Image: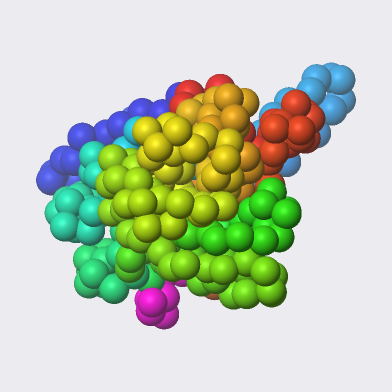
Amino acid sequence: MKTSFPLNPKPAEPVAGAVSLDSTFAKSNRGPATVISAVKLHCLVIRAMAVVIGYSFGWSIVVSAAEPETEGKTVAFVPGVMGNAFYVSMECGIRAEAAKYGFKVEIQGAPQFDPSLQTPIVNAVVAAKPAGLLVAPTDSKAMFVPISQAVDAGIKVALVDTTLDDTSKVITAIATDNTAGGAAAADALAKLIGEKGEVMAIAFQAGASTSDQRQRGFEAEIKKYPNIKYIGFQISNNDPSKAAAEVGSTLAAHPDLAGIFATNDRSAEGAATGLRVADKVGVVKVVGFDAGDTQIKQLKDGLVQALIAQRPYQIGVDGVDAIANALTGKSVEHSVTTDTVTITKDSMQEPEIQKAFYTLKCD
Ligand code: T6T
């Protein structure tokens, strides 16, 4: 159980009979670092004793891994947007891992994927001075200053999902290998259209690293198919209705369009709507990114033909571990990538594949 003590400007009166840190260490003239080491040693000894006692009584006991540097400290999470299954799944990983360290988790995010909305949120989080911050920057340049201010305030910052052009100040950047994910989308789309015909991409937001990298990965890979013609990309600003309209206007100019790569869930939703309006569902093949409930249903219903799923839960877990390691003086990998899983209607029943589905509710 955690107890919170209100801040008291007056030094506390010693309680009769209580052994205080003062009485144990003051006379020996030890500095603060020695006191902290002694407290840590004390905790270790108590944990070790608990394990030994547990073993001798045949109990199975779980001893918390929490250290004084993490126990009761706050880790803030600022997702790219609130309420999206990708970030909710990441939140589930964050919460589960945070519990192991005794971290408190605070989540704040904007209703849209937009750096002008995310900046004041990051500023407010910095003002509250959490020990750690997990943030998905919605623009790889515009979010540099607010995130730098968090670092300058002494907060351990880990980028999750999206990244910055300059990551020199943060402890780590943990993301899907989005370039490889874009390439996987190109291969899946090529297969679906028999390796011939015209294809387009929908970038969900220029300047968001994930959108840019997926698009570039797709463009590089699709070139390898000599009978596929890439007719270019449209930018949907993470707005499904804009993506739908773009698909409609592209079809007007390219009635034989064979395939679409939608760089995230919102653009895939829009692409499906655009095809429905144009009566081209199933005729034009769609490969989307992400695997929330809506995407899985669209796959089942034949509105899209393949999904590239990420590992948001794992990204959340890795982000919390990085912050805990930084706070406890352990080494932290500066860049971590996670893989993707390609899901088709044929493979979606496989239990291994289903593990990659996102959630809107943590267990
Ligand atoms: O595709 C994910 C995420 O990786 C991207 O950075 C933003 O869009 C999503 O959150 C899905 O909406």
Residue 345 point in image, percent of width and height: 70, 32
Q: Residue at x 23, y 54 (%)?
A: 114
Residue 78, above or below 93: below
Residue 248 point in image, percent of width and height: 35, 46
Residue 211 point in image, percent of width and height: 43, 61
Q: How is the image coloured?
A: rainbow
Q: Residue at x 71, y 60 (%)?
A: 195
Q: Is residue 109 left or right of residue 315?
A: left
Q: Nearer the viewer, residue 357 or 277?
A: 277
Asked whether residue 12 appears in the rendered view, the answer is: no
Q: Residue at x 55, y 45 (%)?
A: 284
Q: Is residue 228 left or right of residue 29?
A: right
Which quadrant of the structure image shows residue 222? bottom right
Please check the rendered image and state whether residue 109 is part of the magenta-colored stretch, yes or no.
no
Magenta portion: prevailing SS class: loop
Q: Nearer the viewer, residue 29 or 201?
A: 201
Q: Is residue 123 left or right of residue 34?
A: left
| Segment tinted magenta in the rendering | 165-175
Quadrant showing the C terminus: top right
